[in-house]
Amino acid sequence: MDYAPNELMRPVYDAVQDTLAASSLRLDLQEIRNAGLTRVSGRIYLRYYAGKRQATAVGMDQWTAERWVNDIHIESFWPSSDPAWSTDVLAQAQLFVSGILPSFAALAQRPVQAIAGLQSAPGNVDPDIGYPVGSVHLYQLARPEDDARTATEAFAQPVLVVTSGRT
């Protein structure tokens, strides 16, 4: 897997690498991961969310639909003012992604990506989300222009793009 943090995420990413091996995925995220994946009309969805969200995604293009259905929010018990909030959220995101992305790529038979972001992190408030939360979006790379690694610095929040499969 290839990891590409933007400059806002770099210090958090570097801090997490030392503790990642000793961390474990929280139960709520294990439940989502363990539910597996499903393919619907060429789209790959997290099974946990597919039943709840795929009807809305029918009219969307593949890239938008997968990102919308496969949107996982990651919260932390740390207050967002504590630097531990960012490292906790990113560690959980990395553990989740490392546990699901290889299966996603195998099912897709093409490169796939996950974008882990720190939405509404201190100093980087997302106007659409009024509380601190991390997110992970999963999708297939159907076209080279969908590759988020080429535009990590365009994100207003700290992001980490993880790619699996050949590109």
Image (spheres, helix red, strand yellow):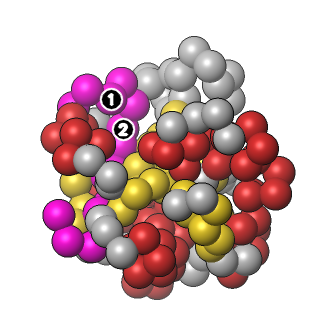
What label sits on residue 28 in the rendered view? none
Left or right: residue 153 versus residue 86 is: left
Question: Which residue appears at 82% of the width and 57% of the height?
Answer: 51
Q: Is residue 18 above or below residue 7?
A: below
| Residue 23 at x, y percent in the picture | 51, 78
Q: Which of the 4 image quadrants contains residue 102?
A: bottom left
The residue sitting at the bottom extreme is 22
Q: Residue at x 55, y 58 (%)?
A: 43
Report if residue 83 lies within the magenta region: no
Q: Amino acid at mark 2?
A: Pro
Relative to 104, say whether 137 is above or below.
above
**SS at circle 1:** loop
Q: Quadrant of the C terminus?
A: bottom left
Q: Nearer the viewer, residue 157 or 43?
A: 43
What residue did someone put label 1 on?
155
Query: Magenta residues, as a range?
Result: 153-167
Q: Residues within 10 Å of mark 1 (few under 14, many from 20)?
A: few
- The amino acid sitting under disc 1 is Phe
Where is residue 38 drawn, in percent x and y? 65, 71
Would you name the residue on which mark 2 appears? 158
Which residue is at 40% across, 57% downward?
140
Q: Nearer the viewer, residue 117 or 83?
A: 117
Residue 166 painted magenta: yes
Marks 1/2 in contact by CB < 8 Å: the verdict is yes
Determine if residue 96 is in view: yes
Report whether residue 92 is seen.
no
Q: Quadrant of the N terminus?
A: bottom left
In which quadrant of the rendered view does residue 166 lie? bottom left
Nearest to viewer (mark 1 / mark 2) = 1
